[in-house]
Image (spheres, coloured by chain):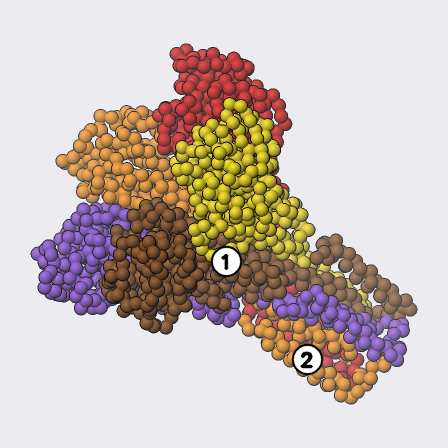
Chain colours: A yellow, B red, C orange, D purple, E brown
Amino acid sequence: MKTLKKVKKRAIKLPGKVEYTGSEPSRKGNIYLTRFEEGSVDIDHKTVAANEITPLIKDGATCWISLDSISDSHSLQELGKVLGVHHLFVSDMANADHQPKLHISEKYIFLTLKGLHFNGNGVETEHLSLILGKGFVVSISERENKFFEEFRKTYLHEASLWSSSPDFLFALLIDFVVSGYFAPISKVEEEMEEAEINLLHYASDVFSAKMLDIRKNLLIARKAVVALRDELAPLQKSPTPLLSAQAALQTENVMDHLNHLIQSIESYREINSGLVELSYAQTSNRMNETITTLTIISTIFIPLTFIVGLYGMNFRYMPELELRWGYPAIVILMIIIGAGMFLFMKKRGFLKK
Amino acid sequence: MKTLKKVKKRAIKLPGKVEYTGSEPSRKGNIYLTRFEEGSVDIDHKTVAANEITPLIKDGATCWISLDSISDSHSLQELGKVLGVHHLFVSDMANADHQPKLHISEKYIFLTLKGLHFNGNGVETEHLSLILGKGFVVSISERENKFFEEFRKTYLHEASLWSSSPDFLFALLIDFVVSGYFAPISKVEEEMEEAEINLLHYASDVFSAKMLDIRKNLLIARKAVVALRDELAPLQKSPTPLLSAQAALQTENVMDHLNHLIQSIESYREINSGLVELSYAQTSNRMNETITTLTIISTIFIPLTFIVGLYGMNFRYMPELELRWGYPAIVILMIIIGAGMFLFMKKRGFLKK
Amino acid sequence: MKTLKKVKKRAIKLPGKVEYTGSEPSRKGNIYLTRFEEGSVDIDHKTVAANEITPLIKDGATCWISLDSISDSHSLQELGKVLGVHHLFVSDMANADHQPKLHISEKYIFLTLKGLHFNGNGVETEHLSLILGKGFVVSISERENKFFEEFRKTYLHEASLWSSSPDFLFALLIDFVVSGYFAPISKVEEEMEEAEINLLHYASDVFSAKMLDIRKNLLIARKAVVALRDELAPLQKSPTPLLSAQAALQTENVMDHLNHLIQSIESYREINSGLVELSYAQTSNRMNETITTLTIISTIFIPLTFIVGLYGMNFRYMPELELRWGYPAIVILMIIIGAGMFLFMKKRGFLKK
Amino acid sequence: MKTLKKVKKRAIKLPGKVEYTGSEPSRKGNIYLTRFEEGSVDIDHKTVAANEITPLIKDGATCWISLDSISDSHSLQELGKVLGVHHLFVSDMANADHQPKLHISEKYIFLTLKGLHFNGNGVETEHLSLILGKGFVVSISERENKFFEEFRKTYLHEASLWSSSPDFLFALLIDFVVSGYFAPISKVEEEMEEAEINLLHYASDVFSAKMLDIRKNLLIARKAVVALRDELAPLQKSPTPLLSAQAALQTENVMDHLNHLIQSIESYREINSGLVELSYAQTSNRMNETITTLTIISTIFIPLTFIVGLYGMNFRYMPELELRWGYPAIVILMIIIGAGMFLFMKKRGFLKK
Amino acid sequence: MKTLKKVKKRAIKLPGKVEYTGSEPSRKGNIYLTRFEEGSVDIDHKTVAANEITPLIKDGATCWISLDSISDSHSLQELGKVLGVHHLFVSDMANADHQPKLHISEKYIFLTLKGLHFNGNGVETEHLSLILGKGFVVSISERENKFFEEFRKTYLHEASLWSSSPDFLFALLIDFVVSGYFAPISKVEEEMEEAEINLLHYASDVFSAKMLDIRKNLLIARKAVVALRDELAPLQKSPTPLLSAQAALQTENVMDHLNHLIQSIESYREINSGLVELSYAQTSNRMNETITTLTIISTIFIPLTFIVGLYGMNFRYMPELELRWGYPAIVILMIIIGAGMFLFMKKRGFLKK
C-alpha cells in the first residue's frame, strides 16, 4: 500500500548548513542559462558555472537560471552567494520535505513549491524553488527530468512571452507548475471512477483499501495545493514593486486554478467517503441476502425433517405407521407445512430481493 | 452513475490563447444586440458583427450585446478587442471549467458564473460570462439554447426595466441566472424526497447509490453557488462607480438568494446523510428479523429432531420402545419441550418485532 | 415523514412585483393601529386603511401599525408607499421563503424574521417583518392568528413600555418573536428525550426515522435562528441613530437568547447523533444475542443428532447395537458430549450476556 | 439517563421584571459584607441589609458584597438599586438559564458565569454573577452552599490578597470559579477511563449509553467554558480603566486555564468517539467468532448427518447395508470427510481467532 | 492502554505560590551558566548559584542560564527575582500542566512550550520554559536528562552560533525543541504503518484499540504543536525590539516546521480513521464469507437430509421402498438436487469470493 511521505527525524538548521533530505540519489546539478536582451529578441541557452552569472544580469535583459538538482549543495550555495539569497532560503531549497513557502524581501521573492507527478502507483511530490530578482529568475528542481526544461522547449518560440520582463516569466513558471497539478489529480479521479464502476466486483475490504489509497493520494495533493494557495495569498493583497500588474494578473489566474483544484479535491474526498459507505451498504446487503437464503431453506426443511424423523422412530406401538394411507397423508401434510412456511415468509417480506 | 465534471489536463494559458474546454460541439456564435435610447424607449434587437458594435455604444443609451457560443474563439476575441477587455478574461470566458470569478477594473466589471440545468440524470453546469462597461452589458453563454434570449423575451415589454441604466440590467441578468438555480436544486430535493418515501422498497445498496448520486449533484450545485457568493461579496463591501445604488440593492437581493440556496443545500446534504443512516438501520433491522426467525425455528426444532433421532436408533435393548404409551409419552414430552423453548425465547425478547 | 420547506422555482423579482410565495390561503389583511401620545399615556387601537396612517405619525408619539396578512399584496404596497419603504423590501415582506434579513437605511430599519410554531408534527415557520421608522413601528405577520395581537393584549397595560419611544417597541417585538422560539425548540427536545427513554421499545429503523425527523426540525429552527443572529450582529457593531441606547441594550439581550438557542440546538443535534449510534449499538447487540442463542443450541445438538443418526443406520453388522448396555452407554456419552460442548462455549465466553 | 438542562418556555423580560428560572427551591438570601480599609489590613465580615452598603463603599477601601441566593428577587433588586446596576443585568443575575456574559460599562463590569459541580450522576451548573465597581466587588451565587464563602475562608489570612484593590479580588474570584471547573471535568474523564478499562465487561449498548452520558456531561461543561472564554476575550483586547495591569495579568491566566480546559474537553470528546468505535469493533468481532463457531460445527456435522441418514433409509435393496465391512467403512469415510472439512476451513482461515 | 494527561484538580494560583504539578520526583535543580564575551569567543560553562548571575549579565555578552528542574521552587523563585520575571510566569514555569504560552513584555519575552519524547509506549510531554532578556537567555527543563545540555554539547563549537546575540540563541533553542518533535511523531507514524501492513493478522477490536492508542498519541502531539504555533504567531506579526531580523527569520523557520507538523498530524489522523474503517470492512467481509460457507453447506445438505429422513420413516406401506431401483433412483435424485442447489447459489453470486 502507498504511504505518505514520512515525517523525518531532523536536526535544527544551523546558519550555512545546506543538506538534501529527499530520496533521490545525490548528484551534481547543471546550471542552464537562458537570456533575452530587450529590443532584439535574443534567446540564448547554455550551461554555465555559478560565477559566470553575475555579469550577465543587467537591466533591460531577462536572465533565467535553472538548476536541475537540489542534492548538489555546492551549486546551491554558490548560486545563493552569487545572487545574494539568504542562506536560510538556500537551505530551504535543499530541504525536500519543506512545505510551500513564499518570502518577499526587498531584493527578491523566494518561493518553494511542490511539483506533482503520478508514477503509476500514486501521486509523488517534487521539491521546486523559484526566485525572482531584479533582472533574473531562478528555478531549481529536485529531479533531472528537466521539469523546467520542458517549459523552455514548449514556449521557446513564443516571442511575446520572452520579451517581457522577468516577473512575468516568474508568474508563468508558477502557472506551469500548477498546470502540472491537473494531470495527477485527474489520474486519481479516474482511478476512483474506475473503482466505482467496478464496485460490484470488489470485496468490500479490497475496495476500502483502494479508497484509502486514493485518499492518501488526495491528501498529498491537497497538502501541496492548499499550502501553496495560503502562501501566494499575500502576494495578491500586498503587491510588491518586483511584480508588475501584468504578472499580478497572471498570479491571480494561478490562484483561480488553485482554488478550483482545492474544491475538486474536497469533492473527491467526499465522494470517496460516499463510495466507502456505498461499499458497506453493498456488503451488508449481500450478507442480508445470504442469511435470508439460509433462513428460507432452514425454515422450510427443519420442521419437515423433524416430521420424517418422528415417523422414523422405532416405537412398537405407533398406530399411524400401520395405516394404509399413513405415508401419503404425511407427505401431503408436509407439502402443506412447507407451503405454509413459504407463504408465511413471503408475507413477512423475506422473499423480495 | 453520474460523475462530477473531471479535472482536465491543461496547459498554461499564454497571453492571447483562447481555447474552449467544455464538452459541447464547437460552433460559430451569433452576436445579438439590443439597444435602448434614453428618452424614447426604443427596443432594438438584431444580429450584428463584432466590429459594428463600437459606434452604437454611447452615453445615455443601454447596449446589451449577447453572444451564444464560447467555442467560437474568433468572435470572443473580436468582442474582447472591440470592448477593450483584457485577453486573460477573454480566455476565462472560453474556459468552461473556470470557476465563478469577479474582476472589478476601472473600465469594466467582469463576471463569470455558472448556469445550472437539470437534464434528467442530474445537475449540469453551463459556463456564462457577463461584462458591465460604460454604456453596455455583454452576456456570453456556452449553449445555443438562448439562456439570455429567454430573458429578453420574458422582459422585453417591461419598459421600466429597459429604460434604466446598464448596471441595473447587469444586476438583473445575474439575478436571472441565480433564479435559474432554484429549479434544478428543487429537482434534486424532489428526487431525495421521493427516495425517502420509497425507502422501504429499495435494497440498501441501491438506495445508497441513489443518495451518492444526489450528493454529487448537490456538490456540483454547491460549488457553483458558494464560489459565486464568495466572488460577489466584495461587490457589496467596496462599491464601484460602475454600479448605482439601485443596482447595488438588486445585487444584495442576489446575495440573499445565494445565501438561502447555500443553507438549503447544506440542509439537503445533512438530510442525505441521515437517509443513508436510516437505510442502514433498516437493513440491519431486516437482518435482525431474518436471523431471529431462523433462530426461533432452529431452537424449537433442533432439540426435537434430536429426540426423534434418539428413538430412531436401532439398539436391540431400548426399553422405552417396547412400552405401550412410549410413543404418546414422547410426543407429549416434545410438545412440552417445544413450548418451553418458545416461552424461553419469548422471555428473552426474541419474539417482539 | 416531515420534510423541509422546499426550495421553490422562482422568477426574478422585477421592480414593483409583490407576490406571496407561502402555502397559506390568500386573504385580505387588516391594518391595526395602536398609538401613544407622549405625556398622556393614550393607548388607542383600531382598524384603519393604509392612507389614513400618514397624519397620525408625528414626533413625540409612537405609532404601531400591524398588518396580519402577507398574501394581501395590495395592502402591502399601499403601506409601503405611505411609509416610503423601497419596493424590494415590500416584495421581501410577501416572499414567505425569504431568509431573515436586516437592512438599515437612513430613514428606516427593515427586518424580516421567522416566527417558529410547533404544530403537533413538527416545527413550522411563519414569515414576519418589522419596520422601524421615525415615529412608527410596522409589524407584518403571515398568519391571521394575531401573533402580534397577542403581544398587544399581554403588554397593553404595561404603561412604562408604551410610553417609551418606537425603537424600544421595535426591540421588544423582536424579543417577543425570539422568545417564541423557546417553546417549539423545547418541544423538539422533549420528543427526543421521550424517544430516548423508550429507546428499548423501538425497532432501530423506526427510531432512526424518528431521529431524522427531529433532526429536520432542528435544521428548520437552526436556519431561522442562525440567520437572524447573523443579520442582527451589525446592529450591535454599527449603531444607528434610529436606535436609542436603551433599545440597543434590549437588542443585546435578544442576541444573548439567540446565542443560547444556537448552542442548545447544536447540543441537541449532537445528542441526536449519539442516540442514533446508541440505537445501532442496541440492534447489533440484540443480533449478537440472537446469534449466540442459535449457536449454543446448534453446537450442542448438531453433534448429538449425528450420533443418534449413526445408530439409526440399518447396517446388518453393527456390533454396538447388539450390546445390552449399548443404549445407556450411548446416552451417557451424549450427555458427556453435550456438557462438554456447553463448557467449551462457556469458556469461550458465549454464555455471558 | 442524564439529560441536558432544557430550553424552557419563557416570556420576554420586561424592564424591571426579575424572576428566578432555576430548579432550586426559592429562598431568602443573605448579604455578606467583607471590607478592607487600606493602610491597616482590617478584615471585617458580617451580614448586612442592602441599604446599609452605600456608606461603606469609599475610595481606598475594598468592599466585597456577597449574596447567596438568586431566587430572592427582592434582595437582588435592592442590591441593583443601591449599586446602580441596570435592571436588565439584575434580571440576568436571576435567570439561571442565562449564558456566560460580560458587559463593560463606564461604571462597572458585569459578568455572569457558570460554576460546575459533579453531583454523583453528572455535571451540574450553578449560575453565578460578579460585578466590579469603583471600590466594590459583588458576587452572587445560586446555591446556599457558600461557593464564595469557601473562597473567603481559604484566603482570609492571605493579607497580600486583601490589601490589593477590588479589581484584583474580582479577577481572583473569576479564577476561583474557573479553578472549580477542573474537578468535575477530571471526574468525567475518570469515568471514561474506568469505562475504557472495563470495556470488555460491558455489552456494547450499555457501553454506548455510558459514553453518551459522558458526552452530555462534556457538552454541559463545554458550553460553560467556551461561552466564558468568548466573553472574557474582549477584556484582554480592550482594557478598561476599571482593571489594573495586575488584575489583567490574572485574567490572562484565567484565559490560559479556559483554553486548556477547552482543548482537554475536545480531546475527551474525540476519545469518547474512539471508544464507541472500539466497542463496535468488539461487538462485531464477538459476533464473528460466534458465527464462525456455528459454521465450523455445522459444516462438519451437516454432511455427516446426511450420510448417516442415508444409511438409515429403509429401502429393501441397499447392497451396502449387507456388507460385513459396510459399517466400519462408512465410519472411516465419515472421519475422512470430517477431517477434510476441518482442513478446508482451516485453509480458508476460519480457525484463527 | 495509554491515557491522556489528566486534567487535575487545582487551586487558584495566589501571587507568589510556585508549585510543581508534574509526575516527576521532586529534586533540587542545578543552574548551568554558559557565557560568551563579544569580540573574543569565550565559551564558559559552570554551575552557579542564582545570586551569582547578576554581575555576569552585561551588554555585548551573551549569558545562557539553564536550570534542569521545575520541582525546585526555591531555585525558580530565586532566578525569577534575580532576573526580574513576574511571579505569575515563575509559577507557570513550575506548572507542568500549563499549555504553551508566549508573553512579550518590555523587558523580556517569556515562552513555555512542550518537549515531546517517545518512551516506548507513547508520546510524553516535558514542560520547558525559555526567557529572553537583554543580554541573557534562560532555559528551564522539567527533567534532568539535560535536554538543553544536549544542545550545548552539539553546538558548542559552532563559533558563528555563539558569537551572535542572545535573541538568536533564543530562536535556536526554540528550533531545537521543535526539531525534537519530528522523532516521536515519526515514531507514531511508523507504528501506524506497521499496523497497516499487518492489518490482516489483527482481530478488528485489537486493531481498533491500537488505532485509538495512536490517536491519543497524535492528540498529545497536536495539543503541544498547535498551541505553540498559535502562541508564536504574534511574534511574527508584531515584532519586538528584543528580536533582531536574523532571529525573526529563524523563528519564521520554526513556524514553517510547526505548520508542517500540524499538516502531517492531521493527515495521520485521517489515515488513522481510514484504517479503522478498513478494518471494519475486513471484519464484515470475513463474516460475510463465513456466513456464505454456512449457507452453501446448509442449503445443499438440509433438503437432502430431509429426503433421506423421508425414506427412513417406518410406515408399513411405502411402495418406493420395495422397488429394486428405489435406492439408486433416490441417490441420483439427490445428486440432481444437490447440483441444482449449487448452481442456483452460483447464479445468485454466493460462490464468488
Q: Quadrant of the N terminus of chain A?
A: bottom right
Q: Measured from the top left, where is residue A196 in percent x and y? A: 63, 46
**Label 2 element class:** helix
The amino acid type, in three-letter code, at marker 1 is Lys
Residue at x 36%, y 33% (from the top left corner): B237
Q: Nearer the viewer, residue E328 or A117?
A: A117
Q: Is residue D139 visible?
A: yes
> Where is mark 1, residue-wise?
A9
Q: Measured from the top left, where is residue D268 in percent x and y? A: 42, 61
| Direction right: furthest residue | E324
The answer to which image quadrant residue C324 occupies is bottom right
> Where is mark 2, residue-wise?
C337
Q: Nearer the viewer, residue B38 or C92?
A: B38
The answer to which image quadrant residue B329 occupies is bottom right
Q: Measured from the top left, where is residue C191 in percent x and y? A: 42, 54
Q: Nearer the viewer, mark 1 or mark 2?
A: 1
Mark drawn on residue E224: none
Q: Badge 1: how crowded within 10 Å, few (<14), some, or many (20+)?
A: some
